[in-house]
Amino acid sequence: MKSRAVLLLTALAVFLTACGSGTSDDDGSELPTEVGEGEGSVVIVAWAGYIERGETDPAFDWVTEFEAETGCMVEVKTAGTSDEMVALMTGSTEYDLVTASGDASLRLIAGGSVQEINIDLIPSWDTIDERLQDAEWHTIEGKHYGTPYVSGFNVLGFNTEVFGDSPPDSWSVVFEETTLPDGQSNAGRVQAYDGPIYIADAALYLSATQPDLGIEDPYQLNEDQYQAALNLLRGQRELVGRYWHDAFIQIDDFTNEGVAASSTWPFMTNVLQFAGEPIDKVVPVEGATGWADTTMMNSNAPHPNCAYMWMEHSLDPKVQGDVSAWFGTVPSVPAACEGNELLGPDGCANNGSEQFDEILFWKTPTDDCNGTAATGSCVPYYRWVTDYLAVIGGR
Amino acid sequence: MTDSASRPPALHRAATYLHKRPWLRLTLLLALPVIWLVGVYGGSLMSLLVQSFFRLNPFSGVLERVISLDTWNTLFTSANNAVIVRTIAMAAAVTIASVIIAFPLAYYMARYATPRVKALLVLAVLLPLWSSYLVRVYSWKLILAAEGIINWFVGRLGMQGVLEAFLNAPVVGGPSLSISLFGQFVVFVYIWLPYMILPIHASLERVPRSLLEASADLGAQSAFTFRKVTWPMAIPGVVAGSIFTFSLTLGDFIIPTIIGDSSPFIGLAIYSYQGVAGNLPLAAAMSFIPIAVMAIYLTVARRFGAFEAL
């Protein structure tokens, strides 16, 4: 009797599991033709510091007014890397928008996680910088998958007390063992980004220091170039104390762990300077990688109307200027550079708007070199992940 | 010859019905738990195992739902083996240290403390668990930092040399306590200590005082009594506590991201493969390593009689 009961129950359980949910394909929904009433809230996956409501500094608030005008309460989910953003958005029905960098946006589009947007519903579309309106990381065959937010560089942050009168101007201080101006080695006092896209930074450094490798685009590496970059990173592993992942943990490391130099975002150097720490930033001579972020909408966004309203709001010149002042980025709307109190008259130039064309923005490495060569010519991103994890593990 | 007035109430009829069919009683009683265990828990483990037999196309990195052993072949690379060994070594070290620290405290609480002091001590042991896990770990990051209080204290005592020696040790050292595996080990021990103290305390409480008195009457020295009487009776508690510390350390991926030198542990590796690369098959395959390790551990624990008290 007992065994019959157990058999019955197990059969029932297996039956229920077998009838488990299959993946339901979304039918290709047509583009919305109008923005309706707000649904009362909007949930955004964003980098830390991208969406401020005055909690850190009351002057930096571009959310409260939006909430008052539209009734859409903004909820932010911060992510530390593009990969986290892709993981959060895949199959999600919880998040409406994501501020995706170029190495995530293409993956999101290919994975069907984000939907095409109707640019006619975004009145401020034409105010966007023309170089960004049809950028390859969010526009596929004329279809737009998001609105550009802001762009920025991965700068070299350094401790001014360590470097004194001779601030660094090259990535060599993080890639190679040297004695810093304060007399001690840089071993254990530098950090590097723990996202696999950092291999491109190594490739960028090699393109300047080892030109015979022939690296032109640090995101399109053939096997030899890729292995050279990995070797450089293995050498760097001896110097790195900790790989940084979280913006605020790095801020704490600069303050409390005596980090001398590291690749970082202007956001961290701004916050540290605001707190009175002796930290400054520079774009080294070899150049820098960067990220041009796009606000993209979930294919299954629970609050599409609020999402469209936020996308329109994010292009407002005041918002663009405020975000750029806070994060140290370059606005996507050129009008934002004028007349913004927080940004100041030179804010855009300080944040690098003049060097826009020189920055190599993040994009996902694909095995066909982003469509420019035969399959298998370049090393695809999933190998970058496995190999970078091995490098961090000391292999 | 029945009329509605003489039929027993519905509840009685149901009770009689069930009384005659014991298998149905059992089915109804066990239905929900078994569906949860087999369907939800077992089913998800099964689907994870099935995922590990898929693979990523080596060129495009797209998931292919083709049964193959490719992923399992790529699991045991030198890098992944290092991750597995590192995690197991950390888990073992944390477990042993936890036992060494927890045992005297649990012994005092069980044998010597007056009831009032015992209650206070149990409260003190449990109190950290009332605050958020992240808050405690972040606090330790500040405590262990190069500018943190431990460094300051060591400096005041003039014992920097000792600290330097620790930090210069190979593998476990680092630029500062917070950026070293040794610091990570300290934080792990702190976080899991309550889970070790309480089971040992519970098992020591069950050692009857009369046994110890009898042992003394028969002429045994206290160390002998401990070795032959107390310790064997405490072993189930020690093993139970060690299961907590071992398995929790094996799977943790939050502490290594905040404290330590970024050396990957199993939890971090799985998170990277799944979340970063979208390499679900490799992440699934790697998830079975902790399961296998714990299965072996539990078998050994059973040999030690950890489950006899159940």
Image: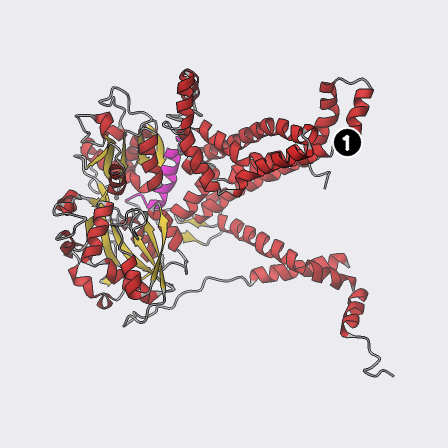
Say which residue appears at 31% left-offset and 33% top-offset: A254
Looking at the image, residue A191 lies above or below residue A15: above
Q: Main secondary structure of the magenta part?
A: helix
The quarter in which the N terminus of chain B is drawn is bottom right
Question: Which residue is labeled 1 in the image?
Answer: B208
Q: Amino acid at mark 1?
A: Pro
Magenta residues? A378-395
Q: Residues within 10 Å of mark 1 (few under 14, many from 20)?
A: few
Q: Look at the image and say whether residue A124 sits in the magenta stretch.
A: no
| Residue B258 screen position, x and y as percent | 41, 37
Say which residue appears at 22% left-offset and 29% top-offset: A160
The quarter in which the C terminus of chain B is drawn is top right
Badge 1: chain ID:
B
Q: How is the image coloured?
A: secondary structure
Tell me if I can see residue B300 in this picture: no
Residue ranking furthest to the right: B1
| Residue A313 screen position, x and y as percent | 24, 61
Left or right, B285 with respect to A152, comes to right
Which quarter of the figure has residue A113?
bottom left
| Residue A104 screen position, x and y as percent | 31, 51
